[in-house]
Image (tube, rainbow, N blue to C red):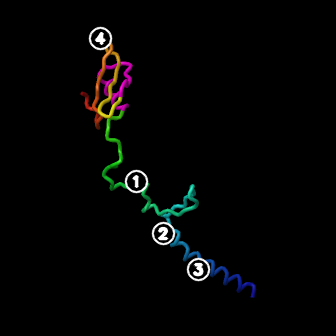
Amino acid sequence: MHQSLQFVLVGLAAISGLTIAPTIAAAQDLELRVGPGGLGVYDRDRDPDRYDRYDRYDRRGRRGCDPDDALDIARSEGLRRAQIIRMSPRSIVVQGMTRRGPERMTFANERGCPEI
């Protein structure tokens, strides 16, 4: 009797293991997160924060000139000790030293930092 009970338990464990295996494989796209809102299960395919390779561009991105890019352009044009002295919604002014003395460069506050 004891052996037959063991045989039945082993059989049930084997059958339940076979039914659980496909469920685990299908749940690989789910993620368990703990945060300020509590415990949550998130589907990776429907997560809005996840980068989607089919997005062409981010419409909320910066559209102006990056100050570091303006400094890099000024340095490549020969300005030493370049620093930003003024930023406005329309322009970025960089001042530095050349062989002839102090000089300023003005860049439009647009993508690509065109020189004015």
Name which residue lies at 34% across and 20% down: 95
The local secondary structure at tag 1 comes to: loop
Q: Is residue 69 part of the magenta span, yes or no?
A: yes
Which image quadrant: the C terminus? top left
Which residue is identified by label 1? 51
Question: Amino acid under label 3?
Answer: Ile
Name which residue lies at 63% across and 81% down: 12
Q: Of the residues tagged 4 and 1, which is closer to the observer?
A: 4
> In whole angstroms, how far apart are the C-alphas of marks 3 and 4?
86 Å
Question: Amino acid under label 4?
Answer: Arg
Q: Is residue 8 part of the magenta span, yes or no?
A: no
The local secondary structure at tag 4 comes to: loop
Q: Of the residues tagged 4 and 2, which is closer to the observer?
A: 4
Mark 4 crowd level (few <14, some 14–19, many ≥20, 10 Å Cα): few
Residue 110 position, x and y percent, is: 28, 36
Q: Residue furthest bottom?
A: 1
Name which residue lies at 42% across and 62% down: 46
Which residue is identified by label 3? 15
Which residue is identified by label 4? 100
Q: Of the residues tagged 2 and 3, which is closer to the observer?
A: 2
For the record, the magenta segment spans 67-86
Which image quadrant: the N terminus? bottom right
The local secondary structure at tag 3 comes to: helix
Which residue is identified by label 2? 26
